[in-house]
Amino acid sequence: DCIIIVAGGEILCHSVIIANRCPVLGRLLTLEKRHPTKSFQDNGDMIRFTELLVPDVRFDVMNYLLIYLYTDDLKVNAERFNPRSPIFRELQWAANKFELPHLEDMCNNVEQYVWGDEYGENLV
């Protein structure tokens, strides 16, 4: 029931989950829910979506942030993660912006959270 519009696309999500897990998105939803901004007809029922505009966050960064909000984890698709990738700095910045200190900490220690302690210990 929510569409987050970011740089590079739109992501569908559940407002209840993001409002309960993310203080900033929860406040944005509270403001925007008064006036749903998109409606679709589905089998005769009108479905209303609330749009949240977040233009300073890239699509892939918001996608990882939402994975965290839904799972409290970054281990999803770990085989594609490179701990030296700039995406972790961008995700860390987004975690700070959206007041998610645990995610910010996970980005600081990405090797440990994504691959486990043994990977972090073996880094040169």
Image: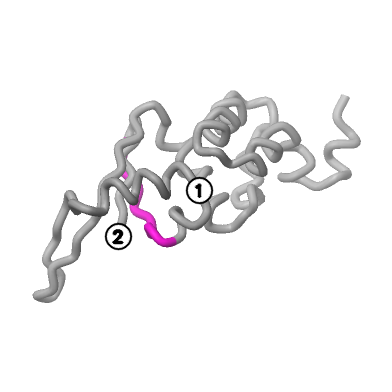
Kindly report which numbered mark, 2 or 1, lies closer to the viewer in this rendering: 1
Q: Residues within 10 Å of mark 1 (few under 14, many from 20)?
A: some
Q: What secondary structure predominates along the stretch shown in magenta?
A: strand
Magenta stretch containing residue 96, yes or no? no
Looking at the image, which residue is at 33% across and 44% down? 4
Task: Find disc 1 in the rendering and name its residue.
Answer: 22
Is 94 placed left or right of 80 in the picture?
A: left
Point out the stretch of residues depicted in magenta: 9-16
Q: Secondary structure at mark 2?
A: loop
Is 85 placed left or right of 18 in the picture?
A: right
Q: Position of residue 16 (x, y in %)?
A: 41, 61
Q: Using the image as rendered, state which of residue 79 and residue 73 is in the foreground.
A: 73
Task: Find disc 2 in the rendering and name its residue.
Answer: 1
> Compared with residue 59, is residue 116 higher up or lower down, i.e. above or below?
below
Magenta stretch containing residue 13, yes or no? yes
Q: Quadrant of residue 49?
A: bottom left
Q: Using the image as rendered, state which of residue 123 and residue 91 is in the foreground.
A: 91
Looking at the image, which residue is at 26% across and 53% down? 33
Tell me the kind of residue under disc 2.
Answer: Asp
Looking at the image, which residue is at 31% across and 54% down? 2
